[in-house]
Amino acid sequence: MADQLSRRTPPATTVHDRQIERLRTLAHWLDDGIPVPGTGFRFGVDAILDIVPVLGDFAGVGFSSWILLQASRMGASKTTLLRMLWNIGVDALVGIVPAIGVFFDAAWKANLKNVALLEGQALHPAETHRASRKFAVVLLTGAALLAIGAAAATWFLLRAGSALLRHTF
C-alpha cells in the first residue's frame, strides 16, 4: 500500500510536503484503504466507524476536522477551508442517516477531497483560490436564496393562518 502512495507522488522533501504526505496517508486509510475483493471499489475506516451510531459519526467528523485544522495551520485560504468544511458537513449530515450514511460515506470520500484541495492550494494556489472563491459565492448565494425562500414561505403561511383564524372565529 505504501508503494502505491509513493509511486503516485514524489518523496516529501520539505516540512510542508511531509505534512501533506501524512494527511494524504490518513485520508487514504479513512476513505480508501480497504479494497472490496473482485471490484474496483474501495472504502475506509470512516465508513466502518459510521456503523456505530452517533459515536462513529463523531469520530469520523473528528478525524476530518483534524485534517481541516492542519490545513488551516498550513495556511490554506479561507475559501479553501470553506470548501473543506462543506465536504465535512455533507459527510456528517448524510452520515447520520442510518444505513444510507454508511454507503454514502464510503462513496463521498470527504477526506481525500479535502487533502486534494490542500494539495491544489499548495501546487496551484491561484487556480485553487479562484475555484474556491467561486464555490464560496455559489454557496453563499444558495444560502441567501434559501433564507429568502424560507422567509417568504413563513410569511405566506403566517398570513394564510391569520386569515383562516379570522374567518373561523
Image: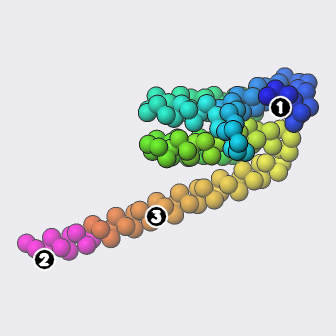
Quadrant of the image occupied by residue 26: top right
Quadrant of the image occupied by residue 27: top right
Please name the residue shown 70% across and 45% down the image.
39
Relative to 106, does residue 70 appear above or below in the rendering? Answer: above
Q: Amino acid at mark 3?
A: Ile
| Residue corresponding to mark 1 | 5
Highlighted magenta segment, given as a residue range: 159-169
Please name the residue shown 64% across and 34% down the image.
44
Relative to 38, does residue 74 appear above or below in the rendering? Answer: above
The answer to whether residue 45 shows anywhere in this view is yes
Secondary element type, mark 3: helix
Relative to 72, does residue 98 appear above or below in the rendering? Answer: below
Q: Amino acid at mark 2?
A: His
Mark number for residue 148?
A: 3
Quadrant into which the C terminus falls: bottom left
Foreground: 97 or 115?
A: 97
Cα gap from disc 3 to disc 1, whole angstroms: 46 Å
The answer to whether residue 78 shows anywhere in this view is no
Please name the residue shown 69% across and 38% down the image.
37
- Residue 73 location in percent, x, y? 71, 28
* Residue 12 counted in the magenta span: no
- The disc, 3 or 1, on the residue closer to the chain's N-terminal end is 1
- Disc 2 crowd, CA 10 A, few/some/many (<14, 14-19, 20+): few
Q: Amino acid at mark 1?
A: Leu
Cα gap from disc 2 to disc 1, whole angstroms: 71 Å
- Residue 14 location in percent, x, y? 89, 24
| Residue corresponding to mark 2 | 167
